């Protein structure tokens, strides 16, 4: 089968096309004929050698943790009706034309939802819907979203707005800010402005009930200062190279609920439920993933460059 492998840690150029043996399903598993592969920012960080304390990865390895496609083979104990189903699932070694998935973590893609949309939601749909539930976003909440123009940020803007929240999206540059507004944000602020926190505070009407930080680093720490007493702060992203440094004791004194990356590491059953909910939101017209660019599988290196340079709005996918 066709695949892309990271031959060593380094820049995007370490991603090279290779031919590998066809995978075989084990008990409770299926083989997916991959249509689209999800890409997420952390994959570029792992490829560069970051996060070895979090990720047990050693080159050479095949990146990729989520795909969409059609089931073409089933292992022992898997009912025959799985054959031919369109599914989306977490997988290992996802940058490939075939992938193996456990049935208990696979989500059937409903009619009316195409496989590119399913791939765009395989990770981010789970995390975004999970974050909205975890932080209890509801009617009247003032919600600040960092990284609002990215793959998951665009979902969070739509989901929070659909729940009746007043959303303020933080992004960089006019094109991204305009996208955030079109998706339902009441206002958008440019984080390249030195006074962005002042502008965000004003747009929020004094502060945020909920901050969803998909950026981390200095910007995340500055956003934490905008969280109101009794609010909720989620530090789930680190594309800047580290999660937001937050004063946990200070947050406790102010009654701020803190959420981190650990709270959005969902097991198979919960991930399937959340992904199915995201698919339902698409079917009902309340959610639309923004797919900025699709690269051929063999151009995974170019896809990583686009992700790292932050030059694409929304999601970057690979097409097998």
Image (spheres, rainbow, N blue to C red):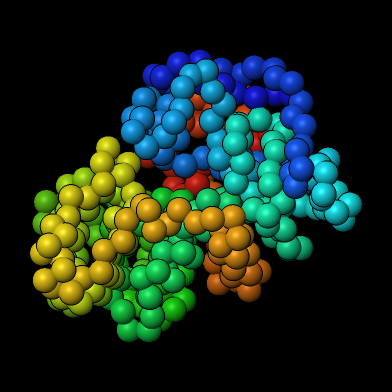
Q: Quadrant of residue 46?
A: top left
Identify which residue is drawn at 31% across, 79% down.
141
Q: Position of residue 78 (x, y in %)?
A: 82, 50
Tell whether 260 sits left or right of 75: left
Quick check: 291 above or below 305? Answer: below
Tell whether 182 sits left or right of 109: left
Residue nearest the observer in this picture, 198 or 97: 97
The quarter of the picture where the N terminus appears is: top right
Identify which residue is drawn at 41% across, 34% down.
55
Identify which residue is drawn at 26% across, 46% down.
243
Determine the residue located farthest toward the bottom in the rendered image: 139
Residue nearest the observer in this picture, 45 or 197: 45
Q: Position of residue 31 (x, y in %)?
A: 76, 39
Tell whether 198 sits left or right of 159: left
Identify which residue is drawn at 71% across, 31% down.
97
Quick check: 255 above or below 24? Answer: below
Q: Is residue 272 visible?
A: yes
């Amino acid at each position: 089968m066709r695949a892309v492998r990271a031959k060593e840690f380094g820049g995007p150029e370490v991603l090279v096309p290779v031919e590998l043996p066809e995978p075989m399903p084990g008990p409770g598993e299926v083989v997916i004929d991959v249509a689209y592969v999800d890409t997420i920012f952390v994959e570029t960080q792992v490829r560069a050698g970051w996060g070895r304390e979090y990720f047990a990865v050693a080159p050479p390895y095949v990146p990729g943790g989520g795909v969409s496609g059609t089931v073409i083979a089933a292992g022992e104990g898997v009912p025959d009706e799985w054959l031919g189903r369109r599914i989306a699932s977490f997988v290992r070694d996802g940058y490939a034309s075939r992938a193996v998935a456990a049935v208990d973590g696979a989500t059937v893609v409903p009619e009316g939802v195409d496989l590119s949309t399913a791939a765009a939601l395989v990770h981010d749909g789970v995390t975004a819907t999970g974050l909205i539930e975890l932080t209890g976003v509801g009617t009247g909440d003032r919600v600040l979203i960092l990284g609002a123009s990215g793959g998951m940020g665009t979902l969070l803007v739509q989901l929070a707005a659909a729940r009746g929240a007043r959303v303020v999206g933080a992004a960089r540059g006019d094109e991204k800010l305009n996208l955030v507004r079109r998706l339902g944000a009441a206002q958008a602020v440019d984080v390249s402005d030195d006074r962005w926190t002042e502008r965000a505070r004003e747009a929020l009407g004094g502060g945020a009930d909920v901050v969803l930080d998909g950026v981390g680093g200095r910007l995340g720490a500055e956003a934490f200062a905008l969280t109101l007493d009794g609010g909720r702060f989620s530090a789930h992203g680190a594309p800047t190279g580290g999660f937001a440094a937050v004063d946990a004791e200070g947050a406790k004194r102010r009654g701020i609920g803190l959420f981190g990356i650990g709270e959005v590491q969902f097991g198979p059953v919960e991930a399937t439920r959340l992904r199915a909910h995201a698919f339902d939101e698409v079917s009902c017209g309340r959610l639309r993933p923004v797919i900025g660019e699709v690269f051929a599988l063999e151009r995974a290196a170019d896809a990583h460059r686009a992700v790292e340079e932050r030059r694409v709005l929304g999601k970057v996918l690979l097409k097998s």
